Image: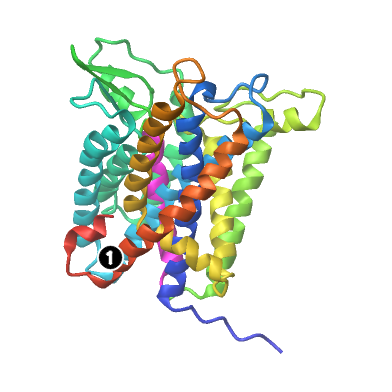
Amino acid sequence: MTNAPTAAPPIHQRLLSIDALRGLVIVLMLLDHVRETFLLHRQVADPMSIDSTEPALFVSRTLAHLCAPVFVLLTGLSAYLYGEKYQGKRDVSAFLFKRGLFLVVLEFTLVNFAWTFQFPPSVIYLQVIWAIGISMIALSALVWLPRPALFVVGLVIVAGHNLLDTVHFAVGSDLHVPWAILHDRGWIEFSDTLRLRTSYPVLPWIGVIALGYCVGPWFTRSVSAHVRQRYLLLTGTGLLLGFVALRWLNGYGEAQWTNYGNVTHTLMSFFNITKYPPSLLFLTLTLGVGLLLLLAFERAQQHKWLSTLAVLGGAPMFFYLLHLYVLKVLYVLCVAVFGLNHGAYFGFDGIGAVWLTAIALVTALYWPVRWFAGLKSRRRDITWLKYF
């Protein structure tokens, strides 16, 4: 007897898994930002130094590597579903352009102020919100390509951009600024009193958002749950196998890994990958894990904890801004109460306190985020709410 094909679940169930995955990476992002706030005296390099980074700190930082790739991929996926829900490419292109521009402005204003508490700023860090915004603006043009062509563009960018790692342009060159924005992380001297730091070069992220858009049709009503889950399993597993094979060869896009003579440090070396800009290995590992998590979440629709994560993922920009300001206020209060106990910084003595603080903050921030997500769901007539 043959099994009947599995019907596609209602669209709200598919979106629940997407929002839950967003919620998970938001929690991991919070953990990393607590580390950056209260363990600032023990900053890690990119890639990390195995000899000077304790395993617990390495694991915390590596978990956070999931955040940007998964979020950018889901942004592309959601853009496709937005176009399916409304009027097609014209509407999705306009929405991507406007939202992308909004995120760029947000990075220059509220986000940067949350990190520095300086006004006017002397330094502006162009980080993940900037990268997502520029990627959305780029996708607003790329969506007009046929889907196979868009897939090729995304694949070529993600797989091939490490060939450009040796390309650099000196300060003063006409290509220094555009190349610093696209691929070569560096400083841009905007004026005598203002510098820009391109923390997130955007070229690889444009490739990721394009691939996310190409994944979008897997989540339409015409694709059964069985077929979609097979696609997620095969693609996620294939990416992870590709990561292991390419990393084992000890070549393209990364510093070589080393056998330290013990399992812990050898594994740390093997999984020590480059984020700025994200290497091919970085993206195969994180996107592979992300797709398998999306598969697991889709199969776990009945579990209550999934709905809890989905609440956080339902208002991601609100959570992002809220947690940045809460962390900054907490840090200022700790300095006022306890003083600078690690040189020029106040900081925790170990990574355990970072994890405990992150758990406490997720619990506390869940309630205002739940309120805002509910408002966003109820008041669809308020246009600006959809940007958060």
Occupied quadrant, residue 85: bottom left
Magenta stretch, main secondary structure, is helix
Specify few, some or many for label 1: CA neighbours under 10 Å numbering under 14, 14-19, or 20 or more.
many
Q: Position of residue 25 (x, y in %)?
A: 49, 50
Residue drawn where x is 29% and y is 53% of the image: 143
Q: Position of residue 330 (x, y in %)?
A: 40, 37
Q: Is residue 198 above or below residue 294?
A: above
Q: For the C terminus, which image quadrant?
A: bottom left
Q: Position of residue 304 (x, y in %)?
A: 54, 71
Occupied quadrant, residue 110: top left
Q: Which residue appears farthest toward the right when viewing the image?
A: 261
Q: For the N terminus, which image quadrant?
A: bottom right
Q: Is residue 135 left or right of residue 234?
A: left
Regarding residue 284, the answer to whether it shows in the image is no
Regarding residue 245, the answer to whether it shows in the image is yes
Q: Position of residue 19 (x, y in %)?
A: 43, 61
Task: Judge whether residue 206 is colored magenta.
Answer: yes
Q: Is residue 157 left or right of residue 234?
A: left
Magenta part of the chain:
203-220
Residue drawn where x is 20% and y is 39% of the image: 105
- Judging depth in this view, the residue of 43 and 205 nearest the camera is 43
